[in-house]
Image: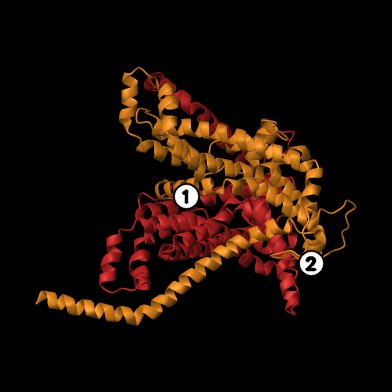
Amino acid sequence: MGMVREIVKNKYLYVLSLPGLLFLLIFAYLPMAGHLIAFKRYRLSDGIWGSEWVGFDNFKFFFMGSDWYKVTFNTIFLNGLFIVCGLGMALLLAILLNEIQKVVFKKIAQSFIFMPYFISWLVVSMMVFAFLNTTDGILNRTLAANGLDPKNWYLMPEVWPAILTVIYVWKFAGYYSIIFLAAITGISGEYYESAKIDGATRFQQIIHITIPLIRNVLIVLALLGVGRIFYGDFGMIYGIVGDTAPLYPTTDVIDTYSYRALRQLGDFSKSSAVILYQSVMGLVTILIFNAIAKKIDKDSSLF
Amino acid sequence: MESSIRQVKSVKAIKVKTDRSLSEKIFLFFIYAFSGAFALICFIPFWLVFINSFAAESSIKRSGYQLIPQNFSLDAYQYLMNGRQIASSYAVSMTVTIIGTVLAVLITAMYAYVLSHPKVKYRNVLSFLTYFTMIFGAGLVGFYILIANWLHLKDSLWALILPYMLNPFFAFIMVSFFRTLPYEINEAATIDGANDLKIFFKIIMPISKPVIATVGLFYALQYWNDFFLALMFIDDYKLHPLQMMIRQLISNINIGAYVGGSQTTYTQPLPTYSVQLATVCVTIGPIFFLYPFIQRYFVKGITIGALKG
């Protein structure tokens, strides 16, 4: 009865929460029933409940092939590259920008660096295509102008982890550098004052004051990234690589793989098995790394 | 005695300073050179897209994309404006972004307010329900079946709007803002006879403008830039948002130039490079038109969200 009394007492507040709560139930919890399909042979006409149970057959099928290893490796490897290079570059930029005294230069540089964050992956994809396409791409034109052979970039899977990392750094370094800059701005000026009196150079100040004092922010951001390492960025990979099959060996991540299984092969059961595998692995890693992040800095963990 | 030591020290410091001034200068040069170079690398693709959308097609075909094209022309924009797709795509993107952002901000703010309210006994239950969706997703298949088979939203604009109406991360940004508001406001209003609905809409919303602007911008950007939902649920060309139009333009040329001028031939006329670029310009135009405003609120939002969320 306590529950009813509570709801009646604060009825207007619960009314306010109602649309949001309904949204979560319908769009976040109801579709979780889709995970059941991983254990069924799904047929559209039978629906989720009516389709035949097949136990772990879909998982067997997925894990017996070599695809599961390839997409898992790609997801973790690419995300690892993104975290290391993205945060590394962002940290460097934040430290450098913080040293800049000329306000106009700093403002313009920051505006430019932050720009790529705002555009969609398809716009990025168009830019990438302008750089790399075989016949008229800027890169191949430049190579040709210097007497080198143009290359078929969209047929060379081995270079794409590097290309995607460059794109990621280009797009997100500005975003993360703002977080680092905020942390650097929070450092008390007294540290620098006393270091200056002791004759420390700016470089020494960075190494011995700035970096140690924002180390926690860096670690927490990295841990949060690692916590989501099983989730590929669908918009990025599918937006840029799309259906270019020759690049799948190094760029196909769990998310693009399950998307194709669903939308192009129409194989609901297989896609569902892949997704349940991802969700479970994702949940476990998030819980582990979130706990670690919480230990390091209890305000900075996700929850 | 003491003062003489201090004097010696400061003389030493000056000496050290002059010794190091060269390395300081080099360091300073490196700072400006590196951040300047990175800023340029970020900016140049935008410039290339912008300026080459005004290039004559023959100029691109002859010498590729250039920092300053040899011949200018408005053909691309003319071609674009003569077609029907750009107008309908623009209308779709605008509608989805405006309706979506307004509804999403309202729902998120209402929900976040309840999560932050100390009077609500079940706020932790609600918070957990919200958190859990962040760490364990329903996944693509269930989501697809929900939208396509249960709600029958295929080829409907609601399929582009509804799924993004409550983002837990943005909700928690708002929660952390609402928690900073003094509770006395609430008590005073309650004594004056206002109920919680009135307090929220008449008092809380007006003083929460900064966080509403920030979260609103996050939502607007998400709606404007999204292509995932359209890819999944929209087959009808008339309902393609701008992002899908870009995708269509890329994938039509894909076959020709992507894989090295291969065998496949298209019977329909290929969309030209400059038309692609013009479409991109038209798509990112509103973002850059509002850029100073956007930048300010985003920086605020990221800082709150990252350090507190």
Q: Is residue A189 left or right of residue A157?
A: left
Name the secondary structure under disc 1.
helix
- Taking the spot 72% from the left edge, 62% from the top edge, the residue there is A130
Mark 1 or 2, which is nearer the eye? Answer: 1
Q: Which mark is residue B299?
A: 1
Q: Which mark is residue A135?
A: 2
Residue A220, visible in the rendered structure: no
* Residue A96 rendering spot, x and y as whole percentages: 44, 66
Quarter of the image with the N terminus of chain A is top left
* Residue A28 rendering spot, x and y as whole percentages: 56, 37
Q: Say which chain is orange.
A: B
* Residue B94 rendering spot, x and y as whole percentages: 66, 38
Which amino acid type is shown beneath numbered disc 1? Val
- Taking the spot 36% from the left edge, 49% from the top edge, the residue there is A299
**How many numbered marks have been drawn onto this rendered protein structure?**
2
Q: Is residue A299 left or right of residue A32?
A: left
Q: Are there few (<14), some (14-19), or many (20+) residues within 10 Å of tag 1?
A: some
* Up-down relation of residue B103 to residue A109 (above or below): above
Which amino acid type is shown beneath numbered disc 2? Thr
Name the secondary structure under disc 2.
loop
Q: Are there few (<14), some (14-19), or many (20+) residues within 10 Å of tag 2?
A: many
| Rendered shade, chain A | red
* Up-down relation of residue A168 to residue B110 (above or below): below
